[in-house]
Structures are given as C-alpha cells and as structure tokens.
Image (cartoon, grey):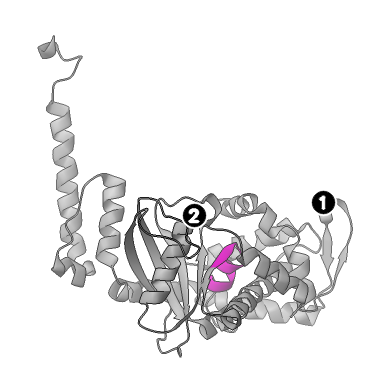
Amino acid sequence: MSVDLLGRIRTALERPVEPAVAAFAHRLAAQSPVPVLAVLFYGSNLRTGSLEGVLDFYVLTDTPQIEKIWPRVSYHEWRCSPADTAPDGTALPDADLRAKVATMPLETFRAAAAGERLDTTIWARFVQPSALVWSHDRAASRAAGEAVAGAAKTAARLAVALGPDSGTPEDYWRALFRATYAAEFRVEKAGREDSILSANREHFDGLLPLALVAQGIPFARGGPQGTIRPELDAAAKARILAWWQRRQRLGKPYNVLRLIKASTTFEGAARYAAWKIERHTGVPVLVTPWRERHPVLAAPSVLWSVWRARKAASLAAANSPNDTDDRAA
C-alpha cells in the first residue's frame, strides 16, 4: 500500500474531536463485553463538532466474525458533567449525549473496506471523513488506518470505472456516490452526492489520485480544474464493473436483511425510538420493560398513543382562547 495514501489517511483520522466524543468512545471501549481494538467516529457531528442529536461510532473488536449479517447496532445514552474528564484531562460539558454504535470485528471491517465482501456500506461510508477516537495500541491504530485506506482504494477503483473517460476528481466521486446510493435500500434527496462533496471538499481534495497510485491504476493528468484521464484497459474495467454489478444486484436485498436483523437485535432500540419520537413530535413515550424487550411488537400501540396525544393537543389548542378571541376582549 502506498505510504503516501496511508499517511494521508492516518493524518485525517487524527483530526481533533470534541473532548466529550473522545470520552464517550473511551467508555464504549471500556464497557464492551469483548476486547476492542479501535473506535471510529463519523457522520455530520464530526464535521460540525455538535454534540446534539445522535453521535455515530464504529467499535472494531478483536473477535472472530460469527454473525452472518453485521454489524450489531446498539443505542447508548450518557449524561456527562464537568465532574467527568476526557482522556486528556479536559473537563466535559454538562450534556446528555446519545450515540448509535455499530460493532464488528476489525478483520471483517478490513475485508469489507477492501471490497472482499458483498456489503457496500463500509467502503462507501469510510471513504468519507472519519476520526480514530480510541485505539488499544499502536498496532491497532495502524490496522484501523490501513482498513480505512483500503476503503479509499475500493471507492476510487469503482469511481474511475463508473465515471467519464476524463474529468475532474469530483466527477468521479459524484458518479460513485450516485451509484452506491441507488444500490442501497434508502431514500436520499436528489443531489445528495453534491452535498457530500461540498461539505467535505478539503477531505476529498487530492484523495483520488493518491488512491489510484496506491493500487497501480495509471492515469494522465492535465486540463482545467485538475482533470485526469484514467488508463484502465478494457479487461480491467470489465472486471471492476462485474464486481460492482453483483453487489449492485444484491444491495437492496442485503440491506433489507440488515433492517430485519436490526429490528430484533438493536440493543436499546426502544429508548432510541422513544427519543426520536419525542424529538420530532414533542410527545414523550414511556419505555416500559416490556417495550424495551419487544420494540417491534410495541410499535403499533406506541404510534397509536402518540397519534392520540397529538390529536388531543391539537383540539385543546383549537378550543383555547387567545388574544384575538372575542371572549377575551
């Protein structure tokens, strides 16, 4: 692997994060029932530095892969205060933190990032910005960096196979994200690929050439705006596209299986759903022990109670006097 690419990725992974995020990652590693090698932080909160909403972590473990469908997803809440400190000793804010945590073996993560698995989400997600917020030791840190560099190589390889004969790096990244979003079982707004690139311009600047050099894919430079012309021969391009077409066909079914699995194994799903419902509707949801154990079975009654509460609030607001009501005059 090119030291240039690995060095670029390792520098990016060392980006600073809020002390509370680092402390949360440390808690996740310390409280894990299995050995943890590394914790990655990603998502919009990484870019903005906000502690609002839900923080996104990947916990990478030193365990064999047993489950057929991965990762295992869980929801965690932590009330931190100035009495708590980050790993560097920094006092933390008084805040309620929430996190969605995906857990999987580091080796499975590495293989998925390298394109050796059918899953597309790992390399498509981790070619985007992330931060290594905790690691067990230097060896684990290096292994995590190599895995994320593998995601960049996989994404770049497919980008130049899908993109135009020549174009700017953004043209190739745009083609990549448009294709991967279409292959997954989720709805994104039109132009989502443009928002990713504009929000992370510094991260992607210069990344594509480095990732191509790292795997020996030749290209010619030149032209306006850093235009490049990949020099993939017909056989190499056909192999890459055949690799992608298989994953494209299986993308939606695989994501459906992951959703089905998550509906029964998402640890803390009831608390996560309750928080989401209250945030979006203003209606608090009581999480009973039964609802905690059976979130899917509890969903219809919860939605019914939320609908009734919102209807009652709407009727009360409509019938209450206000400053413009004649009765208040």
Quadrant of the image for the N terminus? bottom right
Residue 195 badge: none
Q: Earlier in the sequence, mark 1 or mark 2?
A: 2
Which of the 4 image quadrants contains residue 269? Answer: bottom left
Q: Is residue 243 visible?
A: yes
What residue is rendered at 43% in x and 72% in y?
102
Query: Residue at (58%, 58%) from the top-left corner?
Result: 16
Residue 185 visible in rendering: no
The boundaries of the magenta stretch are: 121-132
Tell me whether circle 1 and circle 2 mark residues in contact (CB < 8 Å). Answer: no
Outermost residue toward the left? 327
Please tell me whether mark 1 sits on a helix, a strand or a loop.
Answer: helix
Q: Nearer the viewer, residue 4 or 157?
A: 4
In the image, 91 versus 228, the foreground residue is 91
Q: How far from the left and from the top, in percent, is residue 165?
A: 80, 64
Residue hosting label 1: 225
Quadrant housing residue 85 = bottom left
Against 243, is 134 above or below?
above
Give the amino acid at mark 2: Asn
* Residue type pointed to by label 1: Gln
Q: Say few, some or many: other residues with alpha carbon within 10 Å of mark 1 (under 14 / 14 to 19 / 20 or more).
A: few
Query: Which residue is labeled 2 in the image?
Result: 45
Few, some or many residues within 10 Å of mark 2 (<14, 14–19, 20+): some
Is 167 left, or right, of 188 in this rendering? right
Which residue is pictured at 43% across the width and 84% down the height? Answer: 35
Residue 124 falls inside the magenta stretch: yes
Which residue is farthest top?
329
Q: State how many labels appear.
A: 2
SS under mark 2: helix
Point out residue 149 in the picture as x, y percentages from the top left corner. Answer: 66, 74
- In the picture, the quarter occupied by the C terminus is top left
